[in-house]
Structures are given as structure tokens and as C-alpha cells.
């Protein structure tokens, strides 16, 4: 909505990883050099760490875009798996056909693949995002691929990219044997105030207009302090600030608008750090990325009153679990009781409501809300005093029978078709049939629903569903993963 008002050709602060918007700070440039030289110079094992939202995944995309054809790449981001599933995923990413085979057969197939690459003097780069979720025994077996005596093993380059916890994990006693093979460790730092200002100006310029003067220095300073220099939080704050400027008919983002924005987005502040830094938050905001990642649709917001109150559930929603409590729960329980109803207040958006009651907002969550509230015709518009159902995310909601007597699983709703591919490659769904249907959520918002079918019984569908949920790859349950 605000694009035309401010003169942008596209959204300047989208949270989807896009190399065009990459702003290179000193540590981002250092991380990119470390990854690039690690692969091209065949240094072996390279580790890059950084807090959630510091731009690691965007760096990976930029890296992969610039690699030559002589470098075969496996990009892996499902990391809550055992080594057999990890190796299977790597082979699939390298374009290998995988049958129903065990770990021994997979290892042999990988060795044969490497011999073919050696004959062509090609490098194989295994790039793993969210590596902090890998178990120590999985990392140990992965490193063994590199230190094999076979000459072809020297062509394997391993890049582990993850949150700061990865540094501690690599210091485990079981991995001491491989410590000498980790040739480079690099950490990405949050942005300082000067970098924050330049980062904002860079994204505004890429989106089609000069950033000079649009955000006043005091507004940038407030955004930087609140965000603690985390680019993803800066994106969310700047996007909301532009929306607030649009609704207030202001052409400049000043201190007043910045203050209003920080109040609106208070759940992203330091007190919510435990939630924000959870690996699941990446899925909630980025989607299964690309490798990575899950799709996020572009959402806009209604005009809001300055005194808008936070969501207040009615008596039917008394069982709602507070967001703070949900953050501390290992296995998230339903956000509210079945059939709970809330009354929309002025200034609310569907995304805001989803964030409050489920702890995240993505196309899957929003699509579920739309399905249970057919009176809403546009994902970008809900109206004050409207009654809305906020359903519990039960297993029955995602599993259903088909006409042939088998069962299907609703996997999620995504903002683009590329985001579906990661789930389609999941080893748990091998041999199943996928179907994609279009979902028009607004005049300018098109989503894609993904179902998988072919489960002989409800029990088998349920087992697969629970395993996928445990992996953290279902966008409806991203905040309960880990």
C-alpha cells in the first residue's frame, strides 16, 4: 500500500533473503570472503556464525549465485535429522536418484559420486544452514566424509553456517579429532549505528528511491537501539514505520513515527529475545527456505488509532496460552481452545492477531484464520468490533481422508511455489503424491496450498505429521520446533 506513496518500485524491507538487497558490513564481507575462499581454495571445513537475523542466509544465497559450474553444491537447511537422512538430503541436492536404501548404500553412492567429480576435477560444496541444530554425532559423521583417505574426499568442502550455539557445539569432546580440519571460523556481528543508517539507505535505494532524508537521524538511532543491530528486526521496524507514515500521511519517518512503531512492535524487543533467537523464528519469518526456507506473502496493514489496545480474548478464549509462556514450552500446546472467539479492536491486523495468539504470522497461519472466518475476504483487512474465531491447531485440522480411502496431510500455505520444493524433498514424504492449489488471499496476494496424499491409514499419516512437526518444517508449528 505504501509503495506508490513513497515512490518505491518494490518492497524495500522484505524479510525474504534476496542478494540484491545485501549490504556488506565489514564482518559480512569477511564472512563472504571466508566462505568463498574456503570453497575455491579447497580449504576443507569453514564455519560462519551469527545471531538470528544477521543476514547469514542472504549471504549464502549471494555465495551460491556466484559459484562456477565446476562447483557442485548441496544446500541443506533441514538439520534436525540423523546422519542417514542428512546424507540422503545431500545426495538429492546433488541431483542423485535415491531409492529406499540404508546408510551403507548411501555412503557407497556418495563415494561413487565423488569419484565421478574427481575425474572432472570438480569441487563439491556441502553448505548447511541452521547448523547449530545438528547433533554432535551427525557432525562427527559429516566430518568423516572429509577426512577419508580417498583422494576424492579432498574435493569435499563443508560450510557450516549457524547461530552462535554452533561454536559451543563444535567444541564438544567428540569433535576434538577434527578440530584441525576446521580451517576458518568467522562470526558476523550486528550492525553498529553507522552501518544501520547505511543499511536502511541501501535498501531504500535498491527499492527504487534515494534514502536520503526519508528516515530522520533520530528515528534511525531509535530503530538501531531497539533492534540491537539485527538486520531482520531493522527490516520489520522500517516496514512498519513506513506503513505508519503512510497512514498518517507523513512523507518523513521522524521520531514520533519511530516511537509509535516501537510500541507497535514491542514484542520484538530485548525482553522477547529468547523467542526471537529461537531457530523456529527463522522459519516463521523466512519460511523453509529455500533451503531454507518457507514463503512469506507481502502483507499490508490497516490504518490504526494511536491508542489501539492489545488483543483481549473473550470468555471463550480464556484458555489462551500467553506468548511468553509459549516461548518457554518445548512442545507448544494449542494457542486457544477450539472455537475461541475474539473481538477485533481498532488498528488490529490479521497478522498482528496471529502473532499474539500463535506466536508467529505466516501464510499458513493466516490461511487457517481465513478458513475459519469466511466473512474475511481480504487478508489485509479486518474490521473493528468483528467477531473472529481463533482455532486450536489440532492434528485433525491437518489430516483428512481422500476419496480412494487413503489419507492426506495439509502441509502448509506458501507465498511462492519455490518455497514448496523443500517439503517435497523431505525423506519422510518420499513416494507420496503432492498437490498444489492456488489461494487468492487478496486482490494482490496469491498463495499456494500444499497437500501430500497416499497414506494408507490415518495412523501412518499421523506418524508422518508428527515427525514433520518435530523437524520444525511445518510452518504452522514453526514456533514450537526445537
Image: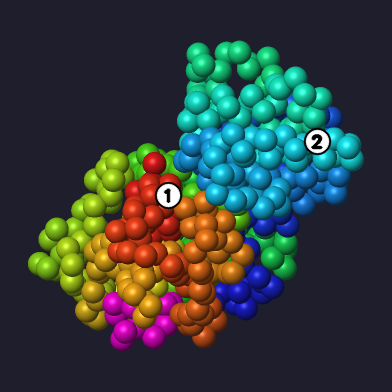
The disc placed on residue 440 is none
- Left or right of 45? Residue 455 is left
Position above or below: 81 against 365: above
Q: In which quarter of the image is residue 48?
A: top right
The disc placed on residue 472 is 1
Mark 2: secondary structure: helix
Residue furthest out toward the left: 315
The percent position of residue 207, horizontal first and vertical second, equals: 69, 65
The percent position of residue 429, horizontal first and vertical second, equals: 48, 58
Toward the viewer: 449 or 145? 145
Magenta stretch encompasses residue 294? no
- Left or right of 130? Residue 303 is left
Residue shown at the point (86%, 44%) measured from the top left: 70
**Which of label 1 and label 2 is nearer to you?**
2
Q: Report the magenta residues as a range.
A: 370-381
Magenta stretch encompasses residue 378? yes
Residue underneath mark 2: 115
Q: Report the quarter where the N terminus lies.
A: bottom right
Toward the viewer: 411 or 413? 411
- Left or right of 349? Residue 177 is right
Q: Quadrant of residue 121?
A: top right
**Looking at the image, is mark 1 or mark 2 earlier in the sequence?**
2
Position above or below: 28 against 154: below
Q: What is the distance, in whole Å, between disc 1 and disc 2 at their CAs?
A: 34 Å
Residue shown at the point (50%, 13%) measured from the top left: 173
Q: How crowded is mark 2: few (under 14 residues within 10 Å), some or many (20 or more)?
A: some
Residue shown at the point (67%, 35%) measured from the top left: 108
Residue shown at the point (63%, 17%) measured from the top left: 178
Mark 1: secondary structure: loop
- Residue 291 at least partly seen: yes
Amino acid at each position: 500500500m505504501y509503495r506508490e506513496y513513497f515512490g518505491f518500485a518494490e518492497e524495500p524491507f522484505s524479510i525474504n533473503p534476496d542478494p540484491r538487497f545485501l549490504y556488506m558490513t565489514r564482518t559480512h564481507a569477511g564472512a563472504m570472503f571466508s566462505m568463498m575462499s574456503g570453497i575455491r581454495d579447497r580449504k576443507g571445513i569453514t564455519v560462519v556464525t551469527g545471531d538470528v537475523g544477521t543476514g547469514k542466509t542472504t549471504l549464502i544465497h549471494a555465495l551460491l549465485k556466484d559459484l562456477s559450474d565446476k562447483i557442485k553444491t548441496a544446500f541443506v537447511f533441514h538439520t534436525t535429522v540423523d546422519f542417514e537422512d542428512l546424507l540422503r538430503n545431500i545426495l538429492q541436492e546433488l541431483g542423485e536418484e535415491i531409492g529406499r536404501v540404508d546408510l551403507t548404500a548411501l555412503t557407497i553412492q556418495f563415494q561413487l559420486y565423488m569419484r565421478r567429480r574427481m575425474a572432472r576435477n570438480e569441487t563439491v560444496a556441502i553448505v548447511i544452514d541452521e547448523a547449530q541444530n545438528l547433533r554432535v554425532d551427525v557432525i562427527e559423521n559429516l566430518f568423516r566424509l572429509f577426512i577419508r583417505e580417498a583422494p576424492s574426499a579432498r574435493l569435499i568442502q563443508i560450510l557450516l553456517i549457524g547461530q552462535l550455539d554452533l561454536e559451543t557445539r563444535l567444541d564438544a569432546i567428540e569433535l576434538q579429532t577434527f578440530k584441525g580440519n576446521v580451517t576458518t571460523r568467522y562470526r558476523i556481528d550486528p550492525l553498529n549505528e553507522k552501518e544501520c543508517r547505511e543499511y536502511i539507505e541501501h535498501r531504500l535505494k535498491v527499492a527504487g528511491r534515494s534514502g536520503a532524508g526519508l528516515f530522520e537521524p533520530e528515528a534511525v538511532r531509535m530503530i538501531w537501539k531497539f533492534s540491537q543491530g539485527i538486520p531482520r528486526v531493522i527490516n520489520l521496524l522500517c516496514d512498519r514505520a513506513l506503513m505508519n507514515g503512510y497512514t498518517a500521511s507523513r512523507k518523513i519517518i521522524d521520531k514520533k513515527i519511530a516511537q509509535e512503531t516501537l510500541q507497535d512492535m514491542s514484542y520484538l524487543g530485548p525482553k522477547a529475545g529468547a523467542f526471537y533467537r529461537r531457530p523456529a523464528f527463522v522459519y516463521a519469518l523466512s519460511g523453509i527456505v529455500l533451503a531454507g526456507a518457507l514463503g512469506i506473502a507481502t502483507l499490508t496493514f490497516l490504518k490504526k488509532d494511536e491508542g489501539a489496545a492489545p488483543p483481549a480474548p473473550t470468555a471463550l478464549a480464556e484458555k489462551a496460552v500467553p506468548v511468553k509462556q509459549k516461548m518457554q514450552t518445548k512442545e507448544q500446546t494449542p494457542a486457544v481452545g477450539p472455537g475461541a472467539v475474539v473481538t477485533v479492536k481498532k488498528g488490529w491486523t490479521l497478522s498482528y492477531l496471529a502473532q499474539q495468539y500463535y506466536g508467529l504470522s505466516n501464510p499458513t497461519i493466516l490461511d487457517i484464520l481465513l478458513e475459519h472466518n469466511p466473512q474475511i475476504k481480504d487478508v489485509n483487512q479486518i474490521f473493528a468490533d468483528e467477531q473472529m474465531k481463533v482455532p486450536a491447531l489440532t492434528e485433525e485440522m491437518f489430516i483428512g481422508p481422500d476419496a480412494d480411502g487413503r489419507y492426506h496431510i495439509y502441509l502448509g500455505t506458501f507465498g511462492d511455489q519455490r518455497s514448496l520444493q523443500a517439503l517435497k524433498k523431505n525423506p519422510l514424504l518420499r513416494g507420496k503424491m503432492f498437490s498444489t492449489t492456488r489461494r487468492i488471499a487478496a486482490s494482490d496476494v496469491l498463495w499456494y496450498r500444499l497437500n501430500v496424499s497416499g497414506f494408507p491409514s490415518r495412523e501412518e499419516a499421523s506418524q508422518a505429521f508428527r515427525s514433520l512437526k518435530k523437524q520444525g518444517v511445518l510452518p504452522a508449528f514453526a514456533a514450537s520446533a526445537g
